[in-house]
Amino acid sequence: MDTREKILAFIRQHGPTLPTKIAKEIEAVSYIASAHLAELKEQGKIKISNIKVGGGSPLYFLPGQEAHLEGFISNLNEKQKKVYGLLKQKKIIRDSSLVPVFKAAIRTVKDFAVPYTVSIKGVKEIFWKFYDLTKEETEKLTRALVGVRKKPIKKKEEQKKLKQKKTATKTPGEFYQEVINYFQDNSIKVIEESIIRKKSDLEFIVELQSSVGSLKYFVKAKSKKRINDGDLSSVFIQGQTKRLPVLFLSKGTMTKKAAEMLETEFKGMRFNKIGS
């Protein structure tokens, strides 16, 4: 087995690897190992990570081993971790929907965030997809995000009956009822609802009256004791993708950092505590 085949076999067995480990495996000084790695990279047989570990060294890996890089997330900074988490959850994100700190951070997590452009009414926009998303999944999620609608129900009455039927078959929990009571007490009309987790995680589109007429809001209700900045970031992104202002309801309180970010980076989002 020649030296380069030995390198490939080592990476195949161990996954993303530091150049120092490869040098030790082939019993060569670092610059010799680097020369072999550079040639293998040029031939397309290995890839180099954007993420840096240890003293700032990249990882070398084989095509198809991209998922193994997720094991090195701890080497990202806090903002990079948050935007990585958002993208992994959402799968695709519209660049224009990101707050400035996340817009900058997503451009530095190149191993996981893949940019692509979409032409919307003649204007090209940047989107980001999670690295493992297929072409078909990307197209489907993008269409949904930019508002390509499914065929509407022919009759409004049929749509109304369908919503009533769904409501009748639900068995709401205590937290759900607390949120509904809050809406009733504040004359807020529910247009759509989604029960993510019956006892702790709910989403609504609501309508409320103001001095300038009726307003629609995206409402996130979470039954958590402590709401952190990551919770706010995720919900803020959801609101922006829906192009709606956000009302965050919770039985708990915000962390100090979350409260600061609500004032500085998530302007326009409202937070209210409900229940006892």
Image (cartoon, rainbow, N blue to C red):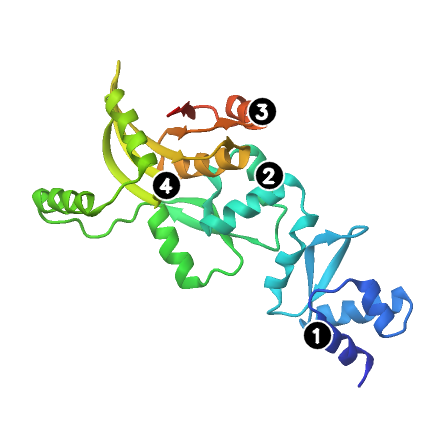
* SS at badge 3: helix
Q: CA distance from mark 1 to mark 4?
A: 44 Å
Which residue is the extreme one toward the top? Answer: 211
The residue that mark 4 highlights is 199
Q: Residue at x 55, y 39 (%)?
A: 103
The residue that mark 2 highlights is 104
Asked if disc 1 and disc 3 are in contact, CB closer than 8 Å, the reply is: no
* Crowd band around label 4 with a 10 angstrom C-alpha radius: few (<14), some (14–19), many (20+): some
Name the side, left or right, on which 57 lies relative to 209: right
For marks 2 and 3, the one nearer the N-term is: 2
Asked if disc 1 and disc 4 are in contact, CB closer than 8 Å, the reply is: no
Q: Residue at x 34, y 33 (%)?
A: 218
The residue that mark 3 highlights is 256
Q: Residue at x 13, y 45 (%)?
A: 159
The numbered disc on residue 13 is 1
Q: CA distance from mark 1 to mark 3?
A: 45 Å
Q: Amino acid at mark 2?
A: Ala
